[in-house]
Image (spheres, grey):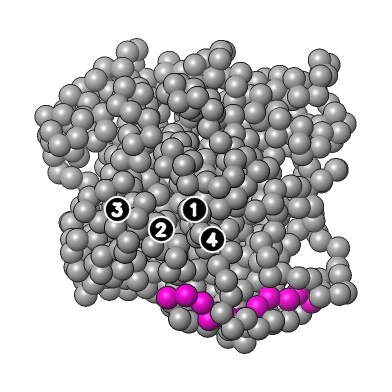
Amino acid sequence: MPIHRQAVSAVAAASLAVYLFKRLRSARESDDDGGSICPGVELVGNAPDIQPERVRVETSKGPVLGFRRSRGASGGIAVHFRGLPFAASTAGTNRWIGPQPRAPWTEPLDCTTYGEACRETTAEIQGLAKQFGKGKVSKLEASGRVGDDCLNLNIVTPSVTGVLPVMVWIHGGSNAISSNHGNCLGWSPTTSEYFAQAGVVSVSINYRQNMHGFAHFPSLGVTNLALRDMLGALQWVQDEIRTFGGDASNVTIYGESAGGVGVATLLACPGARMLFHKAIVQSGAISALSRLDYREHVEPDYVAAIAKATGCREELTRSALDGLDGEKVAFAAGALSNSLLKTHHILCSPPDYHHIFGDDVLPREPHQAIAAGSAAGKPVMLISTASESDIMVMGMGKRIMSWVASFVARFALRGVGCSFLTPPDEAGLPSGALRSAVADLTAGFDAIDTRQPGWQRLVNYLFGTCGVAVSRLAEALGAGGAGPLHAGLLELSPEESPKLCSGHGADCFVLFRSDTPQYDRYLAEMFCGRPAFAASFDTLCRSTVASWAAFARSGRPGPFGGCEWPPLPACLRLRSDSPAPELSEHAADSKELELWRTVCDRYGLPRGRL
C-alpha cells in the first residue's frame, strides 16, 4: 500500500501547535486539565463583560438568549449568541449520518457561553514532538468543552433588527483540531467585535473533524460527514439568520487553511449553490480524493484503527460503526496517527483527512464541477500569506521541511483529477519526471533568490496565491463563469511580527485580532516582543476587516489604503510596513513563473493556469 502523506496545511497546523506549546508551556498554571494559557490573562472568549444585557430572540425551534454589550478597546455595541445548535447531537445513531434536525424547545435556551467542540486527538502533536526529541507535549484541548453535541455556531451581530450582510467562518486546523470559537490564540470572528463594527453579521460554525467527520466508508453509506455539517449550518443560516439581523440573500463564506479547503469544496457542491453568494478562500484550495482512491488506499487503515479501538477483528459493519461512542472514535483517530507514524514514518498527522468526491454531496471532481458552472456568478477572493512556509520552518526545521517541499511539489505536479495517492504512471506522467522536476525547481528557486532556501520558496510558490493549487482553482472558477475574482497576498514585516512573520495563519492573526486589551497585549509580547502592536499593524488590521466587509456587501473588496483592488490576474500585496498596498500586474513573480513553465514543459507536466 502506498505511503500516506499529508497536505501542507496539516504540516502548518502541527508546526504552529508545537511552537505554541513550547512558548506557552512555562506560562501555563496547570497541566493537561486546563487553566489559563497566560497567568492573569483570560482568553478572548472569557473576557469580562462590560454593561451586559440579556437579549431574547425567537427561532423556529424555540427562544434563545444571548447578550448585548460594549467590550474592550473596540468600544462598539454588539449582540452575542454562543453555542447555538444548528443540528441534533451526533451521539448514537446520528454519529455516521449527516446532521439531523434539533428537537424544538419551549424554555429559553441559554446561548451566552460557547458550546461543545468536536473531540480532538493529540497523537499527531505528540508524535511530531517525539520526532524532534522534545518529549511529551501537553494535551491540546479545544478552548471549551468537547463532546458529541458539537454541531453549534456562534453569532455576533450589530443588531437583531437589521438586514445586514452575513459572513460565515469555517475554521481551519487540518480538519483535525480547533473550533468555532478559535484555537489556543482565539482566532475566530466571533471572539471580537471588529466585524460587527463594520456592519456585518458574523457566524462561526463547528463541523465534525478527524475521524468523526473525515472517516469515509462508502460501502456502508458513510461519506463526507464534515461537508454535510457545513451544508447543514449554511441551511440553518438561510432559515434563521433574519432573526439575528442578517440578510439570507447576501451570505459570504470564508475560511483559512483546512477551512479554505472547505470553502473551495463548497463551491463545487450542487447542494450549496443556493446557500451562499460569495466566497473567500484563505491559504487553501481544493483537496479531495476520489471514492476509488479512498477505498483502495485509505479506508483499510481506518478500518484497522477502528478494529484496534473496539477490539473487534471481524469485518466492519454498519451496526459495529453505530456501536462506537465518541471516545472510541477519538481513540481510533489517535491509534491511526500512531500507526502511520510507526509504519510509514509519517512526520505529522492528520492522515488523509480529506473530502471525497463521487457521492451524492460531491458527485464530480471539484475542479471539473466548478469549471462546469457550479459557482457561476459568485464573486471569489483568493488570499494567501506572502511566505506560507515561515510558520512551518519555525516548528519543523530545515531538513524535515525540505522533504515536505519535495512531497508538495510532486503532489502539485500530478494534475487535476489525480490525488496525491495516485501513482505517477496511473496519472499519465513520464517515469522519473516528478523527482527530476522537483530537483530542477528547487535549484532554480535557489538561483532566483538566495534570501530563502529554494525548497522554502518552492513551498510558497506552490501553496500561495500565485501557486499551482490556487491557480487551478482560479482557472476552474474563470472557466465556469464565477467572478469577479480578486487575489491578494498579506505580508507582515519581520519587525511587526518576528515570530509569526508572514507565515501560514498570519491572515487570521490580522483579521481576528483580539479586542480585549489584556490579551492583545499578551499577543504583542509573544509575537513582537513588545507590549503593544505598532500603529501600522493596527491600520493593516482595520483595513483588512474593512475590505472583507466591503466584499461581503458588494462582491468587490473596497479600496485598500486608498488603492483600488483590481480583479485577476492582478494581485494586491497587503503590507504591514506600508500605508498603501503594492499592486502587481500578475499574481506570480515573472522569474518564478518562467521557471515553472520551463520545468513543466521540459518534463511534460501540467502547468495549471499559470
Left/right of residue 560 with respect to residue 296 in the rendered view: left
Give the crowd class for mark 3: few <14, some 14-19, many >=20 residues within 10 Å. Answer: some
Q: Tell me what residue is drawn at x 34 percent, y 36 percent.
A: 394
Q: Tell me which amino acid carries mark 4.
A: Glu
Q: What residue range appears in magenta?
A: 63-73
Element at label 1: loop
Do labels 1 and 2 touch, CB within 8 Å?
Answer: yes
Q: To which residue does mark 3 refer?
A: 529
Q: Tell me what residue is drawn at x 31 percent, y 17 percent.
A: 435
Q: To which residue does mark 4 refer?
A: 42
Q: CA distance from mark 1 to mark 2?
A: 8 Å
Q: Main secondary structure of the magenta part?
A: strand
Percent of width and height locating residue 480: 44, 54
Q: Tell me which amino acid carries mark 2.
A: Tyr
Element at label 4: loop
Which numbered disc covers residue 522? Answer: 2
- Rendered position, 373 above or below 515: above
Element at label 2: helix
**Mark closest to the chain's N terminus, 3 or 1:** 1
Q: To which residue does mark 1 refer?
A: 38
